[in-house]
Amino acid sequence: MPAMSPNFDLRNGPKSARIVVAMSGGVDSSVVAALAAKTGAEVIGVTLQLYDHGEAVKRSGSCCAGPSPNRPGAGQG
């Protein structure tokens, strides 16, 4: 099978491009993010939380993705 070379139509080149990928948690969106990253563009993955996870698990301040080291205040007691 030949290697896939997607065309993201980056008119001003990859170094000045930002590609936002809607991340579903599945393989398809992960593959698209990986292919986009191969172009050299900045790739940002976003997801949407459609329910109150804290309410669902009965824990205040809870989030579905767990702690993020990039979140302001992360790691502070």
Image (spheres, rainbow, N blue to C red):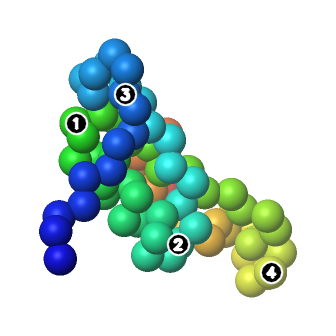
**For the point 57% across and 54% down, which residue is it?**
22
- Looking at the figure, which quarter contains the N terminus? bottom left
Residue 30 horizontal side relative to residue 25, left or right: left
Q: Which amino acid does label 2 sit on?
A: Gly
**For the point 62% across and 71% down, which residue is it?**
64
**For the point 74% across and 72% down, which residue is it?**
53
Q: Mark 4 points at which residue?
A: 56
The spot of residue 31 in percent (x, y) is: 36, 65
**Disc 3 on helix, strand or loop?**
loop
Residue 34 visible somewhere in the drawing: yes
Q: Mark 2 points at which residue?
A: 25
* Crowdedness near tag 2: few (<14), some (14–19) or many (≥20) residues, C-alpha within 10 Å: few
**Disc 4 on helix, strand or loop?**
helix
Q: How far apart are marks 2 and 1 (CA)?
A: 23 Å
**Disc 2 on helix, strand or loop?**
loop
Q: Which amino acid does label 3 sit on?
A: Leu
Give the vertical position of 38 relative to 10 (above or below).
below
Q: Name the residue under label 1.
A: 40
Q: Which amino acid does label 1 sit on?
A: Gly
The spot of residue 37 in percent (x, y) is: 28, 46
Q: Which amino acid does label 4 sit on?
A: Ala
Q: Foreground residue, 4 or 39? A: 4
* Crowdedness near tag 4: few (<14), some (14–19) or many (≥20) residues, C-alpha within 10 Å: few
**For the point 32% across and 50% down, which residue is it?**
6
The spot of residue 47 in percent (x, y) is: 60, 57
Question: Answer yes or no: do the residues labelled 4 and 2 have beta carbons within 8 Å?
Answer: no
Q: Mark 3 points at which residue?
A: 10
